[in-house]
Image: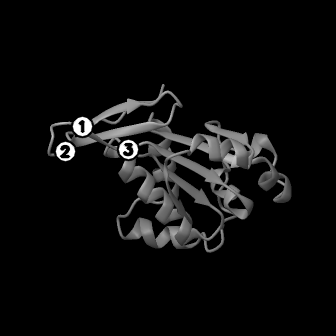
């Protein structure tokens, strides 16, 4: 069972489309303001880019923000049980030595948040020769149209 993040920053709500919104406070007229979900596209398998995306995702989820992660092309490797195929994966040791959460820790944390959802592109895993059984359990395979539907109205960042 995933847990929902609680935060003094706001209350988690969900729109009819299923995309989460974070109520972040009141505007000048006393109405609650909403922050759209964040959609993160991981399109490269470089360690630094994947680590940055996961750091952003964990931070956003911890603050009650809804995060949609989507792997395309080589970025699908970040969603595999064995992520050692990432370029420059040896950089993990430096992170851990510095006391910074590494990729495995960040992924485990994300899998615990209700605010996070994980998807990979169906054509991406085929082109990278990744089978569905190599993917983490929480990951769903969808097409690009499915991602666009899930992330409608979300802020988009590409890593």
Q: Residues within 10 Å of mark 1 (few under 14, many from 20)?
A: few
Secondary structure, mark 2, is: loop
Residue at x 53%, y 73% (from the top left corner):
91
Where disc 3 sits, the SS reads loop
Of labels 2 and 3, earlier in sequence is 2
- Marks 2/1: CA–CA distance: 6 Å
- Give x and y (percent) for residue 131: 82, 46
Assign a secondary structure to mark 1.
strand
Which residue is at 44% across, 36% downward?
20
Question: Which residue shows up at 66% across the image and 54% down it?
Answer: 71
| Marks 1 and 3 in Cβ contact (< 8 Å) | no
- Nearer to me, 131 or 98: 131
Q: Nearer the viewer, mark 1 or mark 3?
A: 1
Q: Going from the N terminus, do you reach mark 2 or mark 1 first?
A: 2
Query: What is the C-alpha distance between the residues marked 1 and 3?
Result: 15 Å
Cβ–Cβ below 8 Å for labels 2 and 3? no
Q: Quadrant of the C terminus?
A: bottom right
Calculate the distance from the C-alpha at mark 2 to the C-alpha at mark 3. 18 Å
Instruction: Name the side, left or right, on which 146 lies relative to 116.
Output: right
Q: Which residue is mark 2?
A: 27
Identify the mark at residue 32; answer none if there is no mark: 1
Task: Identify the residue at image location x=31%, y=45%.
Answer: 63
Where residue 85 sits in the image (x, y, percent)?
70, 64
Residue 65 tag number: 3
Left or right of 124? Residue 27 is left
Evaluate if marks 2 and 1 touch, with contact meaning CB atoms under 8 Å apart: yes
Q: Earlier in the sequence, mark 1 or mark 3?
A: 1
Give percent across and percent down for residue 133: 77, 40
Q: Is residue 65 left or right of residue 108?
A: left
50 in relation to 1, above or below? below
CA neighbours of label 3 inside 10 A, class few (<14), some (14 to 19), many (20+): many
């Amino acid at each position: 069972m995933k847990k929902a993040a609680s935060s003094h920053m706001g209350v988690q709500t969900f729109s009819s489309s299923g995309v989460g919104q974070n109520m972040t406070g009141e505007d000048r007229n006393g109405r609650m303001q909403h922050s759209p979900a964040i959609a993160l596209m991981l399109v490269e398998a470089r360690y630094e880019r994947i680590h940055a995306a996961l750091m952003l995702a964990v931070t956003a989820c911890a603050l009650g923000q809804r995060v949609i992660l989507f792997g395309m092309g080589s970025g699908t490797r970040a969603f595999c049980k064995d992520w050692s195929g990432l370029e420059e994966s040896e950089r993990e040791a430096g992170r851990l030595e510095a006391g910074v959460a590494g990729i495995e820790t960040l992924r485990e944390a994300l899998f615990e948040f209700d605010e996070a959802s994980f998807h990979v592109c169906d054509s991406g895993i085929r082109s990278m020769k990744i089978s569905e059984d190599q993917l983490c359990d929480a990951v769903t395979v969808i097409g690009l149209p499915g991602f666009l539907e899930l992330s409608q109205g979300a802020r988009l960042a590409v890593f």
